[in-house]
Amino acid sequence: MLHELTLEGHGVRLVPLAVEHAEALARFVDDRVWAGMTSATPRGVAALRDVVGTALSTPGRYAFAVLADGEVVGSTSFYDVDLTMGRLEIGHTYYDPRVWGTHVNPACKLLLMSHAYGTWDVARVAYRVEARNARSIAAVTKLGARPEGRLRGHRVAADGTRQDSLYFSVLADEWPDVRARLEARLAGDRADGARTSVLLIGGRSGAGKSTVASAVHDLLVARDLPHAVVEGDALDLAHPAPWEHGVAAANLADVWRRYRSLGHRRLVYTNTVSVLQADLLAAAVGDRPHVTSVLLTASDGVARERLRRREQGESYDAHVTRSDAAAGRLEAAAGDDVHRMATDGRTPAEIATEVVALAGW
């Protein structure tokens, strides 16, 4: 569907998607960027030309290239547009990882929804997300879109499996509040000095995450530095475990919004795999946060000794098994940007002092 609609503001420009944009899109599209799509990851300029061609040939879809500072940094679309019924969906969205957690996504959503409600006078804007796509779930929830339910077996994923879709929406009478939230996020993003500083503390069970976070808290209190400590495990501690719904990231977004409103800018976040989820957590926090990732390590013997102090019987055995598995995964997957810090034979206060220095606090 060819169109001539251009939207501009808040540091981004949305222009009609064209084949000429394929080369720029191909520079950053990879498996991580394409996660949650129903098609296989397009690789190379020719494959992106096919993606653009599909977008342009789909009825009811207004596809855009997203520009920031004159550079193509992504694509997004209106689709399933039915102005007679006053409804549409926003999706087919992907961005260069360099702009994840920046002003780009909230600015695009503000422009798109402002046009949908203000010019087309729609009654409903919907977002459809694959149930496994925690990043997108967190981003849509942070917008203020309301969850509506799950469509089981609704789509065929790129790997050939049937997956559920989660639906979210914003109705016209909810739009003023959603718009205000987006405008506030963008205003905060422009104030660079107000950016959040996040300290992620990860590690296997028995590495000392909670103990070190408590010591960091004591140290910052002694220095009278405003901050908040959030135990990630508590954000989605439920049964059945709701991890696939992105509840932890959505809850973090809500919790941190309240702390920010009180003037807090330093966040200490603990979770076993937090250092592997820096992008997702940064998106939940918003405002292009400065992130310091610290992976606490402990030898098998020390981890077991610490676990034995708090777990017994079958619970102890289960924790040891999970701890060993997590240690291997973390060591293999944590990148060079993650600071590894051994905790064997060291006091929590010593580690806290070093961790706070890494964060620049």
Image (cartoon, helix red, strand yellow):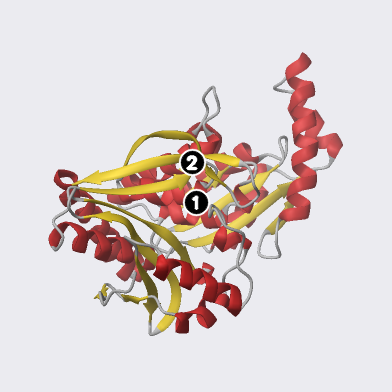
Give left or right: position of 78 versus 118.
right
Q: Quadrant of residue 2?
A: bottom left
Q: Which mark is residue 246?
A: 2
Q: Position of residue 34 (x, y in %)?
A: 56, 60
Which one is nearer the viewer's eye here, 348 or 174? 174
Q: Is residue 280 left or right of residue 320?
A: left
Residue found 51% across the figure and 25% down from its top: 238
Disc 1 is placed on an element classified as: helix
Q: Nearer the viewer, residue 11 or 92?
A: 92
Mark 2 or mark 1, earlier in chain: 1
Q: Residue at horizontal 40%, vertical 47%?
A: 128
Decide if residue 98 is on the left or right side of residue 166.
right
Q: In the rendered image of this protein, does residue 185 appear above or below residue 163?
A: below
Q: Position of residue 306 (x, y in %)?
A: 75, 30
Rounded to the nearest angstrom, the CA distance separating label 2 from label 1 is: 7 Å
**Quadrant where the N terminus lies?**
bottom left
Vertical order, 294 against 58 (above or below): above
Q: Which residue is mark 1?
A: 135
- Marker count (numbered): 2
- Image quadrant of residue 65? bottom left
Residue 323: percent from the left, percent from the top? 76, 35
Is residue 342 visible to us here? Answer: no
Determine if residue 18 is in view.
yes
- Residue name at image x 43 percent, y 34 percent: 150
Badges 2 and 1: C-beta atoms under 8 Å apart? Answer: yes
Q: Amino acid at mark 2?
A: Gly
Residue type pointed to by label 1: Arg
Q: Secondary structure at mark 2?
A: loop
Q: Position of residue 49 (x, y in %)?
A: 53, 76
